[in-house]
Amino acid sequence: MGLSEDAPFSDLSAVVSAASTPGQIADHIMASIAVGALPEGTRLPAERDLAEALAVSRSSVRAALSTLERAGFVVRRRGRGGGTFISRIDTDRVDVYADRLADFRRARRDLLDARAIIQNRVAAAAAERRSTADVALLRDRAVAYEHADTAEEARTADARLHHAIALATGNPHLVEIVQDLDRRINAGFRHDPFSRELFARACADHTAVVDAIAARDADTAGRLCEAHFRSTTMGGP
């Protein structure tokens, strides 16, 4: 995995194996819906993109989405602005997934915890090793986040900023670790929580983290970055 600033942030291959059945694909998406990772109205990637990310056939993805559509969990719309969207789901309709959802929640909580810890050390290393050019890029990425108009744009801008922080460490293995955790958590369709309150908090967090990196204050950069991930994706420390 290289260090390109435009490396993709969507890859399901680490979540669902090449041997996945349509049922397994549907289960993974269902679990994401049930725990709120894919809220009502979320547009899923195109069948071709999902198939490529999953490393499975397009027919398997199509079958999985058809299963979810028949069950009322997704709706397909044609024409301009069309696609596959998450439907409104009543809690009692996913009770049959209770055991699977418990496993999903535990795995996701552990992944989020791991990401917060790793991002602490990555930000600290970036503060110690960053160049002037790195700081300029980080400030540009922070501003780009502030100008995001939609949840999707904000999530992409956030990913690009934290990718740039990892790049500032100068260590390709740290970049790879950060990208791998990001892929596994977002499972091919970025779905970190989003609200205007979280957006405003993230803007302030980003500025503080970038300022600490610019000042070469490793301890502060690491602490602020970990707190940022815990407050914006885990509901608090």
Image: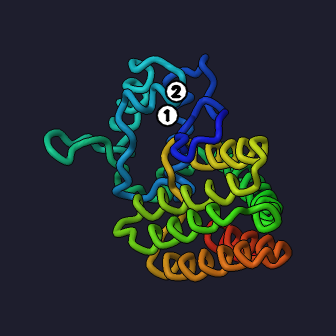
**Disc 2 and disc 1 in contact, CB within 8 angstroms:** yes
Of residues 73 and 116, the one drawn nearer to the viewer in this rendering: 116
Q: Nearer the viewer, residue 138 or 23?
A: 138
* Residue pointed to by mark 2: 23
| Quadrant where the image shows the N terminus | top right
Above or below residue 11? Residue 104 is: below
- State the image coordinates of residue 12 (x, y, percent, origin top left): 57, 34
| Label 2, label 1: how far apart the Cα atoms are | 5 Å
Q: Is residue 96 visible?
A: no
Q: Quadrant of residue 211?
A: bottom right
Horizontal and vertical percent position of residue 234: 67, 68
Give the amino acid type for the residue marked by disc 2 in the picture.
Gly
Q: Is residue 162 above or below residue 149?
A: above
Q: Residue at x 44, y 79 (%)?
A: 196
Which residue is under mark 1? Answer: 26
x 79%, y 70%: residue: 222
Q: Residue at x 55, y 71 (%)?
A: 139
